[in-house]
Each structure stands twice: as structure tokens, then as C-alpha cells.
Amino acid sequence: MRGTAVIATLATAVSAKFFNIQAVEDYDWDVTQWTAGCDGDGCYYDFNVSGIASDRNPARPAFLAYCSGSGEGAPYEECDLLDEADVARRVVAKLLPATRSNGSDTVAHIQVSFQYTDLEVDTTWWNFTGHGDASYNQFVAPALDFTIKPDTVAGVA
Ligand SMILES: *[C@@H]1O[C@H](CO)[C@@H](O)[C@H](O)[C@H]1NC(C)=O
Ligand SMILES: *[C@@H]1O[C@H](CO)[C@@H](O)[C@H](O)[C@H]1NC(C)=O
Ligand SMILES: *[C@@H]1O[C@H](CO)[C@@H](O)[C@H](O)[C@H]1NC(C)=O
């Protein structure tokens, strides 16, 4: 479990220097097989999310992860990485409060974050976060595919 060990070390590097970079150009994540619904205990979701590798600055590895969790406004839950990579990676997701209006057009909001160690410098890591809009489609509509556009990037060296 080399990857787990690397992430644990990085998480404690609180004295590290943070830096933010500009908007992420031409980089999206694909959400597939989104299913979400609500019951008496709250709302829940289930989907795959993937990103392709890119050598843009900062270079990033591909990933494919399976995410499921529950609770609008709940903390991040860990997604399961389904593919292999040479660097440590982590994907998390959480449901944000939905936009509700009268009628059937509730918009579910999901936030996904992808963090990985730099492809060259293993003491640096990058953290991308993005948001997507979907619906609580379980039982009423087919699974959804949509795109998440990462809107925040942070790095730590
Ligand atoms: C996620 O992807 C894996 C691997 O391609 C596949 O086996 C699984 O059925 C997918 N899960 C969902 C919810 O789409
Ligand atoms: C929905 O409609 C009801 C009854 O007309 C109204 O009292 C309520 O404020 C509306 N809620 C929203 C979110 O618009
Ligand atoms: C990315 O950074 C945010 C803010 O520090 C953190 O909450 C989130 O867990 C990080 N993402 C991952 C995948 O670790």
C-alpha cells in the first residue's frame, strides 16, 4: 500500500507552502452512470468519475474512481480508485445542498476533488476540485452522464 503511505505523509505536511494556479484549460472529468435519490434518511449518490492524463502544467495522471455516499452538506467521502498509476492519488466526493423549487426540477449538486503527487517531484502535490449539476434520477430516469469542470487547483511543495 505504497500509495496510502505517501498520502498519509503528505497530509501531515502542514508547514508546506501553498500556491494556486490559474484556471484549468481544456480539462474536464467525465461522470458516468450517475444515480442518485433521496429517502427518509436523506439523499445519496453513486457514480464513476474519470480524467485523462495530461502533460499541461501541472502534469496530471489519469484516474478512474467509483464514488458513493450520502447526505447533502456532508463531509467528503473517499472514492475507490479503479485503475493503477505510478503516483499516489486520491479522489473524494460530497453532495452539496440541492437547489429545490416547486415542481420537479430539483438540481442535485456534487463536488469532486482529485489530489495526486507531482509526476516528477514527490514532495509536491496537486489538488483539483470541481462541481457538477445533476438530478435525483433514481427510479424516475436513466443513469446520467455529465461533465465536471475543475474550477480550483492548489499545489503544495
Ligand atoms: C465503474 O467502472 C467500472 C470499471 O469500468 C465498472 O465495472 C463499474 O460497473 C462502473 N460503475 C458504475 C456505477 O458505473
Ligand atoms: C412552493 O409553493 C408553496 C405554495 O404555493 C409556497 O408556499 C412555497 O413558498 C413555494 N416554495 C418555493 C421553494 O418556491
Ligand atoms: C483537496 O483540498 C481540499 C482543501 O484542502 C481538501 O478538503 C480535499 O480533501 C483535498 N482533496 C483530496 C482528494 O484529498
Image (cartoon, rainbow, N blue to C red):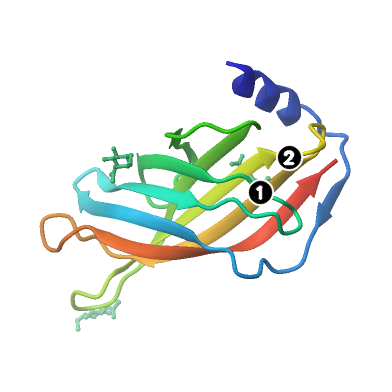
Q: Is residue 57 left or right of residue 28?
A: right
Tell me what residue is drawn at x 77 percent, y 48 percent: 155
Question: Disc 2, disc 1: CB below 8 Å?
Answer: yes
Mark positioned earlier in the residue sequence (2 or 1)? 1
Tell me what residue is drawn at x 56 percent, y 49 percent: 113
Residue in the foreground of this view, choosing between 96 and 8: 8
* Local secondary structure at mark 1: loop
Q: Badge 2 is on which residue?
A: 119
Calculate the distance from the C-alpha at mark 2 to the C-alpha at mark 1.
7 Å
Above or below residue 116? Residue 21 is below
Q: Badge 1 is on which residue?
A: 60
Q: Quadrant of ligand 1?
A: top left
Q: Which mark is residue 143?
A: none
Q: Is residue 99 left or right of residue 151?
A: left
Identify the image quadrant of the C terminus.
top right
Tell me what residue is drawn at x 60 percent, y 35 percent: 89
Tell me what residue is drawn at x 33 percent, y 48 percent: 47
Mark 1 C-beta closer than 8 Å to ligand 3 = no
Residue in the foreground of this view, choosing between 122 and 155: 122
Residue in the foreground of this view, choosing between 129 and 86: 86
* Residue 108: % across, % down: 34, 63
Q: Residues within 10 Å of mark 2 (few under 14, many from 20)?
A: some
Q: Is residue 128 visible?
A: yes
Above or below residue 88? Residue 133 is below
Q: Is residue 75 visible?
A: no
Q: Amino acid at mark 1?
A: Arg
